[in-house]
C-alpha cells in the first residue's frame, strides 16, 4: 500500500523538483522530500528533462522519472523504476512505466550517479 501511495505521489505534478545535474542531453532534478535512507541503502526520485524527444517504440517522450536505489557503503546504484512522459517536466501523458531493478553499477566521479549518491546517502549536506 505504501508503495502505491509513493508511486502516485512521485508521478504527480505536485512534486518539488530541485535541479541536480546538467548532462549532455538532459537536466536532472530530484525530489528531496521523497528521498529516504535506511541503514546503508538509499532511494532517490529523479526527473529527467531531455533537450530533444527520446524514441520509445512508436512514440517519443520529452521527460522521464526514475527511482534510483543506492548502496551507500559500496558506492553502487541502479535504476529501480522508470516512466516516460509526452510533456516536459513529467507533464502530459505517461507513455511508459516499468519497475526495472536493473544491474548494480559503480558510482562514477563527476557524473549524475555521483550526484545521486551524494543526495541519497548524505541528505542535507549539499
Image (cartoon, rainbow, N blue to C red):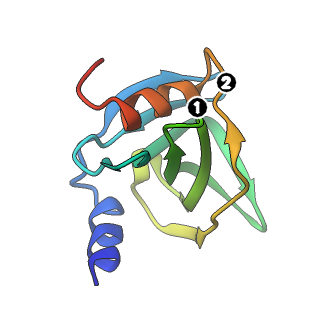
Please identify the quadrant where the C terminus is shown: top left
Quadrant in the picture for the N terminus? bottom left
Q: Is residue 45 left or right of residue 111?
A: left
Q: Quadrant of residue 10?
A: bottom left
Can residue 65 be seen by looking at this rendering? no
Residue 41: x %, y % from top left:
44, 49
Q: Identify the residue shown where x is 36% and y is 63%.
A: 11
Mark 1: few, some, or many residues within 10 Å (few <14, many ≥20)?
A: many
Residue 11 is left or right of residue 87, and the answer is: left
Question: Which of the numbered marks, if any, corresponds to residue 108?
Answer: 2
Of helix, strand and loop, which one carries label 1? helix
Q: Position of residue 27 (x, y in %)?
A: 51, 29
Q: Residue furthest right?
A: 57
- In the rendered image, residue 101, in percent from the top left (x then y), is placed at 63, 64
User: At 28% from the left edge and 56% from the top edge, which residue is drawn?
Assistant: 13
Residue linked to disc 1: 113
Amino acid at each position: 500500500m505504501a508503495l502505491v501511495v509513493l508511486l502516485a505521489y512521485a508521478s504527480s505534478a505536485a512534486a518539488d523538483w530541485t535541479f541536480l545535474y546538467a548532462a549532455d542531453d538532459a537536466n536532472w532534478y530530484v525530489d528531496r522530500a521523497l528521498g529516504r535512507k535506511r541503514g546503508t541503502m538509499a532511494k532517490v526520485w529523479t526527473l529527467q528533462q531531455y533537450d530533444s524527444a527520446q524514441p520509445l517504440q512508436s512514440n517519443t517522450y520529452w521527460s522521464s522519472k526514475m527511482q534510483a536505489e543506492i548502496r551507500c557503503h559500496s558506492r553502487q546504484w541502479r535504476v529501480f523504476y522508470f516512466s516516460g512522459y509526452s510533456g516536459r517536466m513529467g507533464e502530459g501523458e505517461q507513455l511508459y512505466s516499468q519497475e526495472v531493478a536493473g544491474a548494480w553499477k559503480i558510482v562514477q566521479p563527476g557524473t549524475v550517479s555521483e550526484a545521486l549518491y551524494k543526495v541519497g546517502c548524505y541528505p542535507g549536506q549539499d
